[in-house]
Amino acid sequence: MGKAYLFLIIAVAFEGLGTTSLQASQQFTKPLPTLGVFIGFGMSFYCLMIVLQYLPLGVTYAIWAGIGICLTALLGWLVFRQAVDLPAMLGMGLIIAGIVVINLFSKTATH
C-alpha cells in the first residue's frame, strides 16, 4: 500500500508541473514550458496507472485531484503571484479534510 501512495504523491507532483507549465507556455508558444506540460501530464498519468493497480479509481482520482488543486493554487501563488483569498483557502481546507476522511475512515481506500 505504501508504494501506491508514493506513486500517488509523485503523480500529484508531476500534475503540478504540468499545470504550472501550461500557464507558463502561453498557449504553447514557449518551447520549454510546453515540454513541461507534456512531461508533467505524461508522467502524472503513468504514475496514476501504477496507483490504480492498488487503489480504486474513485479514491485515487479524489486524492489526486484534491491535492492537485491545492498544489496548483500554491504554485500559482509562488510562481505567478496569483492571489488566493480566504474563501478559496477555506474551500481547499475542506478538500484536504475530505481526503483525510477518505483515508482514515473509508473502507474503499484499499482493495
Image (spheres, rainbow, N blue to C red):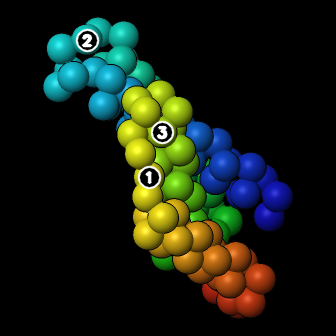
Which residue corresponds to mark 1? 84
Marks 3 and 1, the one that precedes in the sequence: 3
Which residue corresponds to mark 3? 77
Marks 2 and 1, the one that precedes in the sequence: 2
C-alpha distance separating marks 2 and 1 = 26 Å
Instruction: Point out the frontmost of discs 2 and 1.
Output: 1
Which residue corresponds to mark 2? 30
Give the left or right position of residue 63, taking residue 69 as reference. Answer: right
**Quadrant occupied by the C terminus:** bottom right
Q: Which residue appears at 43% of the width and 58% of the height? A: 85
Labels 2 and 1 touching (C-beta < 8 A): no
Q: Camera-side residue: 51 or 69? A: 69
C-alpha distance separating marks 2 and 3 = 21 Å
C-alpha distance separating marks 3 and 1 = 7 Å
Horizontal and vertical percent position of residue 79: 47, 28
Mark 3: which amino acid?
Answer: Trp
Mark 2: which amino acid?
Answer: Lys
